Image (cartoon, grey):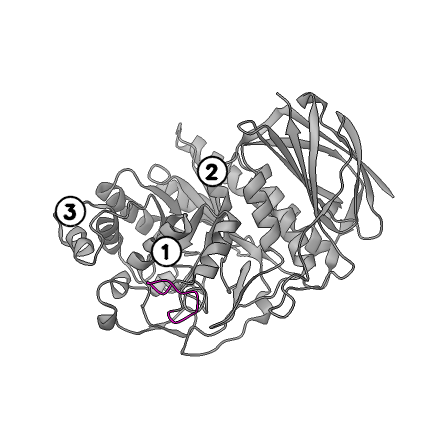
Amino acid sequence: MNKAKLIVDKDYTIGEIDPGLFGSFIEHLGRAVYTGIYEPGHPTADEQGFRKDVLELVKQLNVSIVRYPGGNFVSGYKWTDGIGPKENRPRRLDYAWSSIETNEVGIDEFVDWCKKADVKLMYAVNLGTGTPQDAGYIVEYCNFPSGTFYSDLRRKNGHEQPHNIKVWCLGNEMDGPWQTCHLSAEDYGKKALETAKIMKWVDPSIKLVVCGSSTPLLSTYPEWDRVVLEHVYDYVDYISMHRYYENEGDVNDFLASFVDMDDFIHTISSVIDYVKAKKRSKKKVMISFDEWNVWYQKKQTRFPWQIAPPILEDIYSLLDALVFGGMLCTLLNNCDRVKMACLAQLVNVIAPIYTQKGGKAIKQAIYYPFQQVSLYGRGVALKTLVNCPKFKTKSYGDAPILQTAAAYDESNGTLTVFILNCGQDEDTELTLDIRSFGEVKFMQHIIMDGPDLNAKNTFENPDAVKPRVLDVDKADGVMNIKIPKLSWNVLRFNINK
């Protein structure tokens, strides 16, 4: 059995955990919207056509903010196509995903859905085919009270009160050659600056996210981030990061994805600090990691020019859920710099929720780690001091077999420790030292593991992969806990104040 020691001290703080860390993403892509969140005629559909079974799963997931409407989709999207009477809305070719967009759901409907789901909205404007003035117009439509063309148009369309959207993305992945009207860093920086100026003139209270590197695999990384930030630093509040991981045949590399994710965050943080220093600025731009997940990109299938085809519907395994948990720990451990993050995506498209057209909605394996961290990863993130064996990877060198994170919520007196055990051959006997908290009660040990790493939830067997709860012993300041091999663990403690 492996031996490891973990110290969690209440004074070793990383920073406050922003609720925005538990965001997600819905794009007009595949079945994310149509037969995902929206399906008129479904047995659970409400008066607007939104699936109430999906809404309930979203609420249980405890999502804080949802990015919309894209994604690659947004770079060719005309937002005015999605407002007004539905019978007058045009059908358009979606260049990004070779699909037909019916525009049955637009900004007004999605705002209504967000209210029903109890989530905030992060709206992305089109900086591909769109103009800076187009972006100003949609801010006016959504946030200006009344008395102008677009604000009064919103009122005419049934929403008298402003939508009051507070977080806006300046386009999507404009560094990517795949993007509609892709730009160089210099050209995007100039366009983003002029767009930001107009948007904040319309509503000075909004927060803006500028496009950072969509992957560290591009040759422009991280120079893209430096050039763009030097243009817009004074006008934006966040720079975005996007990163996906997949099992390419080496389980060790896949399990250690959290190492690469951490390095990516540190690199972008360094770029921010450099630009801040160069500008002699007192302002600190934060990170919005607004796309992240496990995604098997090599298995993409195209369904040309269909309405809501089944694109990117990855079915997640127990192994995927373990890797996913390790990435959640990385986000918590960098909460001093990463203030927002969006699991991409939410329904059907590389998502924790999966639906049948006209039928059931189920939880995928990755649903559970996200739900647990979103529920219990609140308050202050604490630095975890770990001494454990390492395992070898081809891409990232030696990686620790334990990836850990801790959150202390003083408001309700709870300490939660999250642990991914990457060890494949032996369980780990963990000596956990939490003496700094005084008297504690071990409330719960939640675990995800199993003999079949390829097990997946299906409509026929929706509970093939789910957490189980272990019996726990009385807690001391220092205790020994068995952490099974290849497992995701949530240890919850009550702190007696």
Q: Residue 233 in the image: x percent, y percent?
A: 37, 39
Query: Which mark lies nearer to you, 2 or 1?
Result: 1
- Which amino acid lies under the numbered mark 2 shown in the image of this protein? Ile
Residue 260 seen from this side: no
Is tag 3's residue or tag 2's residue first in the polypeptide sequence? Answer: 3
Where residue 169 appears, as percent x and y from the top left, is 37, 50
Q: Residues within 10 Å of mark 1 (few under 14, many from 20)?
A: many
Frontmost of labels 3 and 2 is 3
Residue at 33% x, 39% y is 235
Instruction: Compute the Cα span from label 3 to label 2.
Output: 38 Å
| Residue in the image at 49% along x and 57% along y | 346
Query: Is 381 situated above or below 188?
Result: above
Left or right: residue 196 versus residue 354 is left
Residue 43: in magenta span: yes
**Mark closer to the chain start, 2 or 1:** 1
If the image is split into quadrants, where does the C terminus sit?
Answer: top right
- Residue 113: image tag: 1
Image height of 247 relative to 418, above or below: below
Start-end of magenta stretch? 40-49
Q: Position of residue 155 (x, y in %)?
A: 18, 53
* Residue 272 covered by magenta stretch: no
Mark 2 is surrounded, within 10 Å at the Cα level, by few (under 14), some (14 to 19) or many (20 or more) other residues, namely many
Q: Tell me which amino acid carries mark 1.
A: Trp
Look at mark 2 in the image and give the residue it sits on.
Answer: 272
- Residue positioned most to the right: 1
Q: Where does label 3 land, which residue?
A: 146
What kind of residue is marked 3? Answer: Ser
* Disc 2, SS: helix
In the rendered structure, the answer to whether residue 267 lies left or right of residue 189 reads: right
Mark 1: secondary structure? helix
* Viewer-side label of 3, 1: 1
